Amino acid sequence: MCNLPIKVVCRANAEYMSPSGKVPFIHVGNQVVSELGPIVQFVKAKGHSLSDGLDEVQKAEMKAYMELVNNMLLTAELYLQWCDETTVGEITHARYGSPYPWPLNHILAYQKQWEVKRKMKAIGWGNKTLDQVLEDVDQCCQALSQRLGTQPYFFNKQPTELDALVFGHLYTILTTQLTNDELSEKVKNYSNLLAFCRRIEQHYFEDRGKGSSSIRSS
Amino acid sequence: MAAPMELFCWSGGWGLPSVDLDSLTVLTYARFTGAPLKVHKVTNPWQSPSGTLPALRTSHGEVISVPHKIITHLRKEKYNADYDLSARQGADTLAFMSLLEEKLLPVLIHTFWVDTKNYVEVTRKWYAEAMPFPLNFFLPGRMQRQFMERLQLLCGEHRPENEEELEKELYQEARECLTLLSQRLGSQKFFFGDAPASLDAFVFGYLALLLQARLPSGKLQAHLRGLQNLCAYCTHVLSLYFPWDGAEGPPPRQTPAGPETEEEPYRRRNQVLSVLAGLAAMVGYALLSGIVSIQRTTPARAPGTRSLSMAEEDEEE
């Protein structure tokens, strides 16, 4: 969205290369910056920012909505990936352990699962059932849908960091094949969110000629 | 009619109706909506029906202890502070609550339970003084361990090696969050106009604790004091909805008055009982070990005096 030239590289040990242990991270010159927040600030320091046109109240709202997405959607995605037994068994274990040889793939997968379960318990999601998690996702999508309304982007004409974040999560939810499609069904209930994702995908990704999986195929 | 709803929560201190964030939030929400709750202010979490505070016992006997669920239940019982909010404001509420949870909650836990000076001089002191014997010996320590673990897991993803840097980052984000809240509030009376909503209850909970407690190392407090509209907001809510300023003094409403005066005779009775027990213990020990023996000499004196008088009579005769 900022029109910056980037090259995407996929590595199995990306989590370990990152300074904070999380992906994504960018490598610019001799600097390495990880996670969305610091990357946004880094890019801003270099003179590119998407939210300069917002006033203070709007910036506050944008931060709040970004936290909402992080709080609900991210946690729900983690829950579904690691705490729902069917998904864990059929998809996550295999996917997470695929770059490693046996027995490392099993060990690392179990370790990550245990870590995620601990975190869920700490924030109070440990006792939630899948239905409750889906209900939370629905509430979150409803809030996002109401905030978006009929505008093209969350803050009217220009895309901001919030649009990028929401697109990232929703696109992943919509295009990832899982054992049950309830999560993507919840998102598909909100037509303006679907249209929003399609618009960004067309505008920023297909125009550049990328042939990866698109929303239309799912 | 069904039994009234009962709310068990931590009792008040530092000029606030409750010292615990969740209890304060739920209490404030109940005050905003005028829900007829029988409030039990306790200092012993084992007295609550679910073992944790706050806990709501509904009119059907069910016990709810997650604050969000308590508020949802109150909403279902038609005590809804968000009734007049538009859909967009409802969405904003969710967003700002997430913001509070992510940015302010870790720092609040850190300020009250992890920061050593604050913990020893303020938090532990209050809990140890308020809790009954023998809980005050081990329960504050256990609560601290639980909070520290929660804090670790909440921000454990960040670099755990450099604690000071992590602290600085946390406080930096909290300061930003407070500034954002201040900007969103602007010069309005409440976040969504003139009537309080559930978001106000949550924000008030955080702000009141940060502002009112006399913290020896209050870096966030200093920043918060600089945000005039948030301080005014806090005092406004306190004076409007909690005019009796915490647990001391007579409250204006009937419902919390009952249990509070009930606690007074219990305290007096406990004091009298403990003094009596102490006296009985001392006297019993004295008698048993023979330091004092009263009873043996009294029957001997009467025949002694009689024999003296008989001797006198004999002498006279």
Image (cartoon, coloured by chain):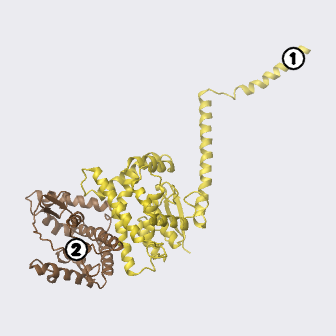
Chain colours: A brown, B yellow
* Amino acid type, label 1: Glu
B236, A84: nearer the viewer: B236
* Amino acid type, label 2: Ala
Which numbered disc covers residue B87? Answer: none
Position of residue A7 in the picture relative to residue B169 (left or right)? left
- At 23% from the left and 71% from the top, the residue drawn is A49
Can you give x and y, in whole percent of width and height, for residue B140 in the image?
Answer: 43, 49
Can you give x and y, in whole percent of width and height, for residue A190 in the image?
Answer: 28, 83
State the residue lying farthest toward the left: A101
Is disc 2 placed on a helix, strand or loop?
Answer: helix
Please report, as a chain letter, where disc 1 is located. B
Please identify the quarter of the rendering in which residue A10 is found: bottom left
- At 21% from the left and 77% from the top, the residue drawn is A181
Please identify the quarter of the rendering in which residue B76 is found: bottom left
A160, B306: nearer the viewer: A160
Can you give x and y, in whole percent of width and height, for residue B131 in the image?
Answer: 49, 50
Please report, as a chain letter, where disc 2 is located. A
Count residues near mark 1 (Cα–Cα under 10 Å), then give few for <14, some for 14-19, many for 20+. few
Residue identifier under label 1: B312
Can you give x and y, in whole percent of width and height, for residue B308 in the image?
Answer: 82, 19
